[in-house]
Amino acid sequence: MSPERLTAPGAGGLGASGRLDLSAHQLSEGDFDALAAGADDVAVVRRLAASERSHRRVVLRALLDRMADRPDIAGPLAPLDEAWELLVRAEATDLRAAAVVDYPLTGVWAMLLLRRLHGVRYDDVPLWVEAGGLHLLAVAAAVRAGLTFELTVPMRRGTVVMPTLGLARLPHRDPWEVAELSVAGDDVRVAGGLGEATVRVAHLRASRSSSRDTPSGFWVPAAAIGAAHDGARIDVVLDDVDPYRHVVSSTLPAPIGGAEVGRWEAVLDSGWQLLVRDHPTQAQAITATLRVIVPTMRAPRFMAGSATSGDAFGAALISEPTDPAELAATLVHELQHAKLGALQHLVDLTDVDRADRCYAPWRQDPRPASGLLQGIYAFFGVTGFWRVRRQVTNGVAAALAHFEFALWRAAVDCALTELRARPELTALGHRFLQGVATTLDGWLTEPVPSGPRRFARAAGIDHHAGWRLHHLVAEPGAVAELVAVWVAGHAAPPGVVLTRPALVGDPAVRGLESRALLIRHLLGDPAAVASWRDGGDVGDQVRGAVPSDLEWLVGDAAGAAAGFERILEDEDADDPHAWAGLGLVAFDLGDHAAARALARVPELVRALSRELALPGLRPGRLEVARWLGAAL
Amino acid sequence: MPAVESKIESPLADLTTTSLADLRVCDDARLRNAVTRLVGRIASLDNQFGYDRRR
């Protein structure tokens, strides 16, 4: 991998033959192994970030080639060549103007459009509007370069978003219209739809801050926030306007108000202080990667949402955090995705995914191998984060940190085993996971206090059992054979018990984390959880939770078992949440054979119980589980 | 004498100093291969250079 370059683009020169004699990026084995081990060496991360400049240009070239096959793609806009030439002129005038090309969300636009042109994505937005993203890049670059120009650009429901600058709004007639954008002297004029407006160029280059009220009027500048602590500074754009900020599909701008920007500023400040103080190497690495936060709605406590796209190195979607530690954990999580995304642009860790999917302990849905790899690396970072937090905090914060550490180290360990058996993993992929495993192995032996450790074990088993109950179907032949063996009064044959079930995938899966969320609430605020027991529906506090979960949580295993049995008897004999809960209470009641079966083959216990519910037979659910568990 | 550090060569062409003007017309094999690799990945169902979310 090349070091960061300060050379002017084009310094090498292009021969008449179109040959540049490009070199390849190279990655030292030391850098590769450091990334795998989770070392967070900022110099390595900076080299990764520099290589993203090349990746973005490959994406752009692929897009230009594909668009060249569609001469009509710009529709009513100026031809693509005109937009491209303006972009080239902007770069030639001022190198910094090309920052629009490297802006994280530009990558999402380019890749979504490329996927659309390859027929693997559909969007309601007309193709010419999406292709006009090139025109918007060009005008943004030209404004930054101080050029005089005019160009037509697409307008989405009266909005024109210029990457890195902000949003122009005009009254509109139709959803998709053409606007004319021109710059002469110090004025930028936008005309389209039912109106036109002029704004000073200097105003376009200014940033929005928390001192402003809810954005209104023609021009909404990009929102910028920052924080500094102990000499370490981070500055990010809060991008609430880019049509591609939601990563998987396009959307309209939704500028947040000054109060919300202020809340982000405050939590970034305190979260940054925590990171710099307690996690300085991660903080440094974050400054080398993160440039854009796409703010999303605040989520309930312990339910923070975030996302990263490999197409948008340097950007992360993050729900408004409830506290500094949550933001810090999220930033570390997304840092991992960013590093791995950039690394995968450099080398192949997996081949193209096969159709079959695998279990990921942090997801409700079955995942492809490449997705599992992303999760492993993200939660590997998260595990390291909580490993530090449990050393620097005390009281309830430490109890939560112990729980998170124990939960995620086991989850990463489990996923590593699964992924290392997959054929998609390349030789480099195996080497990478070996690096992760070596670091993790050291963490797996570290002691954790019994309370959080017990809860972490239960949460891991619960999630896995719930996932199987939602997504796996026991093999009918095996179930029929086991019915016959049961009726004959013999022991369950292990070979039949372990018959591979079918992965069917339940698109309606939900609530796999509800008991883990209750655990977090209990560890973080026991009084609140006690109040949930006394009144109201616990499902109002944690979606998917039931009163029996609270009984289990406080150690009333017999009461919880009766509650889960009641659900299965009276409400839904297949309810995955109740079946998984039954496994947890079986363990607490010392019924280890039943607990083992409900942890490892819960879908088989359920299927067999259903088949044995015959007149005169109808064994208890735990009895069936115990019988199967004896074979495991 | 310090040992020579082993390198892993990437299929990604180094375009860090390539101008946008040159990018569009460049006919270098490394760039062509990098484009082919990209398209091969994004055209798959899962868009392996794509996206991951938490909750």
Image: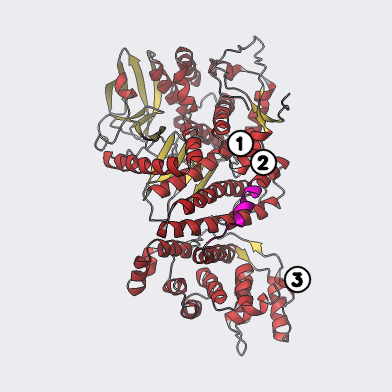
Quarter of the image with the N terminus of chain A is top right
Q: Which callout, 1 or 3, points at the residue further toward the start of the chain?
A: 1
- Contact (CB < 8 A) between labels 2 and 1? yes
Question: Is A38 rendered above or below residue A562?
Answer: above
Q: In this view, does A118 lie to the left or right of A512?
A: right
For the image, the number of numbered tags is 3
Magenta extent = A437-448
Marks 1 and 3 share the same chain: yes
Mark 3: amino acid: Gly
> Farthest residue in the front direction?
B1
**What element does badge 1 sit on?**
helix
> Which residue is at 50% across, 69% downward?
A577
Q: How far apart are marks 1 and 3 (CA)?
A: 42 Å
> Which residue is at 60% across, 50% downward?
A372
**What element does badge 2 sit on?**
loop
Magenta segment, principal secondary structure?
A: helix
Mark 1: amino acid: Leu
Residue toward you, B41 or A50: A50
Residue B46 visible in image? yes
Q: Which numbered circle lies on residue A343?
A: 1
State the residue position of label 3. A495
State the residue position of label 2. A349
Residue A285 spot, x, y in % from top left: 51, 36
Q: Distance between the residues labelled 2 and 1?
A: 9 Å
Identify the subunit bearing mark 2: A
